[in-house]
Image (cartoon, rainbow, N blue to C red):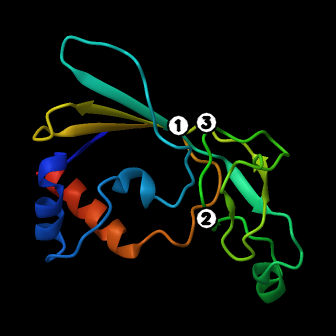
Amino acid sequence: MFDLPPKSTIKQFVGQMLGGRQMHHEMDKKEDGHNWTITKTTNKKNDLDLVFRWSHCLGHLQCKHRDCPQFLHLGSLNKIEWDGFFISQLLLGVGPPSKSTLACSYCKRTLVCVNTCDAHIYYVLPRNKDTIRACIHIGTHAHLVGKRTCKETFKIVKQLIRVEMM
């Protein structure tokens, strides 16, 4: 579990940490190197006026095309670089349905799920944009992390952890 800065101050907070450069306000999911379902909001009501949201890891995906530039160049199928999204987890041995935009980053074609993943991410969001938000990551990823994970984001996360440890 970790805190995310309030939405109203995210640009200022991140700007200070990065010397003015910007990053995604959902760094916890968008830049962690895994593919996630679209974040959904629950309909749970509470006295504290909190909003609860969640997302699932899509699992271990693999391009199935032998004429993919990744396979032609490196001799191995793409197992980590994807574009697009989907609304729910994929079934083992099956690719995404036609309504999905999820595709191989190299050949832009469909993929297949070779292993499911139990990792989930939950958010607790106050309606007040000046309040810190909470993010809870549950489960373990048993598959590779995408190479696109930004080294700069990794540095930021280390800095955030360092600040929290003080």
Q: Position of residue 38 (x, y in %)?
A: 52, 43
Quadrant of res 111: bottom right
Residue that sits furthest to the right in the current view: 66
Residue that sits furthest to the bottom in the current view: 73
Q: So how many labels did they put on this image?
A: 3
Packing grade of label 2 (10 A; few <14, some 14-19, many >=20) is few
Quadrant of res 14: bottom left
Residue that sits furthest to the front in the current view: 99
Kindly identify the residue that appears in the image at 64 percent across and 48 percent down: 142
Which amino acid is tagged 3?
Asp
Ranked by sequence position, the earlier of labels 3 and 2 is: 2
Q: Nearer the viewer, residue 161 or 93?
A: 93
Q: Are marks 1 and 3 in contact (CB under 8 Å)?
A: yes
Ranked by sequence position, the earlier of labels 1 and 3 is: 3
User: Looking at the rendered structure, which numbered label has been put on residue 118?
Assistant: 3
Kindly identify the residue that appears in the image at 58 percent across and 44 percent down: 57
| Residue assigned mark 1 | 139
User: Looking at the rendered structure, which numbered label has been put on residue 127?
Assistant: none
Mark 3 → mark 2, Cα distance in angstroms: 21 Å
Q: Nearer the viewer, residue 50 or 19?
A: 50
Is disc 2 placed on a helix, strand or loop?
Answer: strand
Which amino acid is tagged 1?
Gly
Is disc 3 placed on a helix, strand or loop?
Answer: loop
Which amino acid is tagged 2?
Asp
Residue 27 shown left or right of residue 133 in the figure: right
User: Looking at the rendered structure, which numbered label has been put on residue 83?
Assistant: 2
Q: In this rendering, is residue 163 above or below 38?
A: below
